[in-house]
Amino acid sequence: MSVLSAQNMTMRFGGLVAVQDVSLTVHAGEIFAVIGPNGAGKTTLFNAITGIYEPTAGVVRFSDKVVCVGCTPQTIVRMVATAIVAGVSSVVALNSQQLWSATIDANYQYLQPFPWWEAVGDFGRAITNLSLASGIVTALVGGLVGGAASLVLWWRSRRTPDLIARSGVARTFQNIRLFNELSLVQNVLVGMDHRMSAGFFSALLRLPTFFTERERFHAEALALLEFVGLADRAHFAAGSLPYGFRRRLEVARALAGKPKLILLDEPAAGMNPAEVVDLMALIRRVRDAGTTVVLIEHHMRLVMGVSDRILVLQYGKQIAEGTPAEIRGNPSCVEAYLGTENHG
Amino acid sequence: MRWRPGPITLILASAALVPLVDLALPESLRISEAVRGVFLYAILALGLNVVTGYAGLLNLGIAAFMAIGAYAFAILTCEIYPFQIGFWPALMLTIPIGALAGFLLGAPTLRLRGDYLAIVTLGFGEIVQDVLKNLDTITKGTQGINPLPGPSFGGEQWTSSNELGWYYLLFALLVIVVMAVRNLERSRLGRAWFSIRQDELASRSMGIRVERVKMLAFSTAAAIAALAGGISASVLSSTGEPSNYDFQVSMLALCIIIVGGIGGIAGVLLGALVMIGLNSIVLVKATAALAAMGIGGQGNVLLSPNNWKYLIFGLALVLAVRLKPDGLLPPRIERSIR
């Protein structure tokens, strides 16, 4: 079964084609590497997969499904409801003084009981007596704006990174993006957020669900920090960690959402050889725990050491795909990295 | 582990004791009436702190929500309107009304980033004032709406002479708001707020629904500000004119959270004490003392410390940013672990 498949994906920024017609399929339980020289489009590929960019062309499927908010009946209902509310409120807002005089001022005598039913009747009469422009036209314009806004909102948030993350795809970043002012545990807990269910009022009123959930996820976050070997620093600020540990914390944070697929963007960048060995072990442990791994890496020892399959990109095009042994023997890949040997 | 009172508890406990201390002081040195103003601004600033401190969305129009709360409270209680639902129901209703106003402003604008959102909120603050001024059939324009009722306990309607009662009512509201904000801060939602303040893209990529979380911050802040507006209208028995809720109020609330320590409750409380306390306690007492000595008064306006207000706000802000950029009581990182 493929955990991730991208077909004919193209990502264009104006005249620049960053990724051109790339297709890849990652199977469950694999460690899949994407390599290529700087500027080959590897990170752009990741960003397009995780919803940060909208691919110019091509389809991305996770577990054979396209993750996207479709135009469901709910979307239509929401759009219509927004349009109606916006239309009615614009009429009321535009004519508020007139309506107020007709319903409240006309019926209320100082400190006398207020005739509610008459006021409601007057309100109905006042609103039907509005002129064409301030009644129907305003309602139509307001409704149109409201409906269009709701439509645009839906269109723009069809495929957002948070939606993709919640469908079980986690990632790390090339330039580490931790929440430096939060502690390690809290960083991991942010990654778990979409698995939690306690809402606003449960937190505000400290309902029992809040406490049970907090205990459960706290324990799990500590276990996850244990897994990446950072448990002894659990309550330190993430910003205080040395570089190599930050990478691991990012992995822990990404794993916190229990993803089926994790995308690691240059996890070994800036690491010393000993840290790279640790990282390789960690990546294998992640895979053995049941998460499929896709990684971008320049560090050849790591790539050749852990990957099951490798995709090679150059200038946004895919030039080869295969096992480490195949890639090592492929002259065009060697050329992409090292240049041609000139036997002239 | 032995329980040690935190800074929030200490500040609130000393605030609770102020009227008792006042009993021992001569009339001219009593401060509890001025401390009520500190409470009001503390509530407003705690609201602003949710949106600007926690979620990192600069809101320059928080006073507009205060105005909305005040006018909602007034329209629901004042006897020139038919509703007259009484103090407590009206005060409770200011919260959802404020939240709704926050939602209405937030829904179209929260996708804006940083400075743009600040400009929108700034504009909103001005628009609300203008609307309140010009919608005079409903809001009585620049007159403001009055009289407004206070609460009644045991069938006895409070008047403004019940100073001790008002003091502790405001204190109780402040304590409730502090607890509510603290509960939110130390929760999943608070964590999400902190995370989007630090790195919006990263938290989005971790599955946080950024728009929803921002909206909750915006609405919560608006609801708290509206509560502050409702209670302040009740204390004054009038909404005052719309320009009582102008940009200066928003700015003052912002100064409070910056001087006190943005993103922390204790800091906000201390900031309110420093900024408002300076203004309505120290300067007022100093003016009175100087007047008693025969200095100041009508002659030179500069000799009356009351007029130094904005000078001192500016100075406090400059000093705070220069010397204590994280505020007097910056929030601690390990704060919300448990």
Image (cartoon, rainbow, N blue to C red):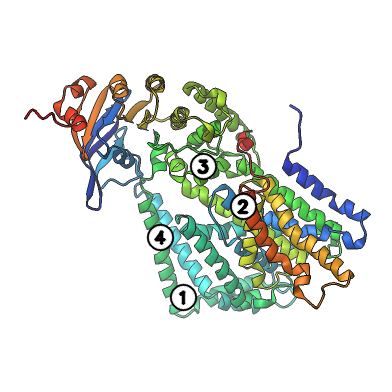
Chain bearing mark 4? A
Across and down, in percent, residue A251 comes to 43, 29
Tell me which residue sits at (50%, 45%) in the image.
Answer: B196
Q: Contact, CB < 8 Å: mark 1 with mark 4?
A: no
Q: Residue furthest front?
A: A344
Which of pointers 1 and 3 indicates the residue nearer the eye? 3
Circle 4 residue: A149
Q: Is residue B153 visible?
A: no
Spatial CA distance of label 2 from label 4 is 44 Å
The image quadrant of residue B69 is bottom right
Spatial CA distance of label 1 from label 2 is 56 Å
Q: Nearer the viewer, residue B234 or B45?
A: B45
Which of pointers 2 and 3 indicates the residue nearer the eye? 2
- Quick check: do tags 1 and 2 share a chain? no
- Quick check: do tags 1 and 3 share a chain? no
Tell me which residue sits at (37%, 36%) in the image.
Answer: A174
Location of the C terminus of chain A (image quadrant): top left
Circle 2 residue: B322
Disc sitting over residue A135 in the figure: 1
The residue carrying pointer 4 sits among few (fewer than 14), some (14 to 19) or many (20 or more) residues within 10 Å by Cα, namely: some
Circle 3 residue: B195
Tell me which residue sits at (50%, 76%) in the image.
Answer: A128
Spatial CA distance of label 3 from label 4 is 28 Å
The image quadrant of residue A341 is top left
Q: What residue type is disc 1 on?
A: Gly
Q: What residue type is disc 4 on?
A: Ala
- Quick check: do tags 2 and 3 share a chain? yes
Upstream in the sequence, badge 1 or badge 4? 1
Q: Nearer the viewer, residue A227 or B333?
A: B333
The residue carrying pointer 1 sits among few (fewer than 14), some (14 to 19) or many (20 or more) residues within 10 Å by Cα, namely: many
